Image: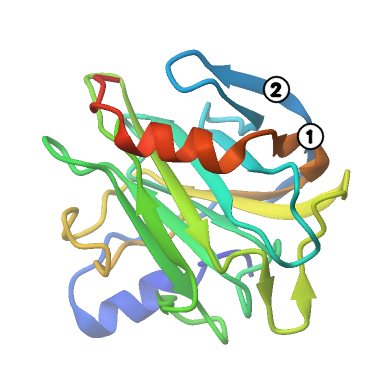
């Protein structure tokens, strides 16, 4: 079973859930596309999944193994109810980032983890600061968040020099039950796959200063 595949079963215990049939997991692919955001001068390494969801990552150019903050940006079509990343490439025993639109307000990021193939619960070891511009319009929603505690868990430490770090993406067409609540329940995914990311291409000079500037900026319309 793939990432979050048993979420619907867990949801059924706590309330109504929309059950969908997940598509088979796709082959792992690699990505090293560069994307630079004109409004913030932040350059990310970018991966696009088949549904057009963009996963963008930036890390400090001074990052050391297992000890760095990470800036994540997700841009998704409006039809995507929620999108996520498994930072160890699997569902269990690694940090999960789940994000979704909150119409009329700031988009939401939720830190999750699952120790077995059950519904992933909130995970306090990773914290997120959502940056301005994390909002939605008639076609897309976006979220940009600074993550702390994401580069190391258990015996695993992410290597900022790696050119092939395995992550997994996951999406669902159904929005969470309570979109304003980052602890909301959500339904089973409808698509998922692994990808191999060139983390070394995510390095950003002046990371802290650029993130602080972006955090202080006036929110912009997507």
Identity of the residue furthest to the left in this view:
104
In three-dimensional space, the C-alpha distance between marks 1 and 2, rounded to whole angstroms, equals 8 Å
Answer whether residue 9 is visible to the viewer in this image: yes
- As displayed, is residue 164 above or below residue 65? above
Residue plotted at (70% across, 22% down) = 34
* Circle on res. 201: 1
Q: Residues within 10 Å of mark 1 (few under 14, many from 20)?
A: many
Name the side, left or right, on which 144 lies relative to 220: right
| Residue 35 placement (x, y as % from top left) | 62, 21
What is the quadrant of the C terminus in the image? Answer: top left
Q: Residues within 10 Å of mark 2 (few under 14, many from 20)?
A: some
- As displayed, is residue 3 above or below residue 142? below
Name the side, left or right, on which 11 lies relative to 160: left
| Residue 115 placement (x, y as % from top left) | 56, 86
Residue plotted at (52% across, 80% down) = 114
| Residue 137 placement (x, y as % from top left) | 23, 22
């Amino acid at each position: 079973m793939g990432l979050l595949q048993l979420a619907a079963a867990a949801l059924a215990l706590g309330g109504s859930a929309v059950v969908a049939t997940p598509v088979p997991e796709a082959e792992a692919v690699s990505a090293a596309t560069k994307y630079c955001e004109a409004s913030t001068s932040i350059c990310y390494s970018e991966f696009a999944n088949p549904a057009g969801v963009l996963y963008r990552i930036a890390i400090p150019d001074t990052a050391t193994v297992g000890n760095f903050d990470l800036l994540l940006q997700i841009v998704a079509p409006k039809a995507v109810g929620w999108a996520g990343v498994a930072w160890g490439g699997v569902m269990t025993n690694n940090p999960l980032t789940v994000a979704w639109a909150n119409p009329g307000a700031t988009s939401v990021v939720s830190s999750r983890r699952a120790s077995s193939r059950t519904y992933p619960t909130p995970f306090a070891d990773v914290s997120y600061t959502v940056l301005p511009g994390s909002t939605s319009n008639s076609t897309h929603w976006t979220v940009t968040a600074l993550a702390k505690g994401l580069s190391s868990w258990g015996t695993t430490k992410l290597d900022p020099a790696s050119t092939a770090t395995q992550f997994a993406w996951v999406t669902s067409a159904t929005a969470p039950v309570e979109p304003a609540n980052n602890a909301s329940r959500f339904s089973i995914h409808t698509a998922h796959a692994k990808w191999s990311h060139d983390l070394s291409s995510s390095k950003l000079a002046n990371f802290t200063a650029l993130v602080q500037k972006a955090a202080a900026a006036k929110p912009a319309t997507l």
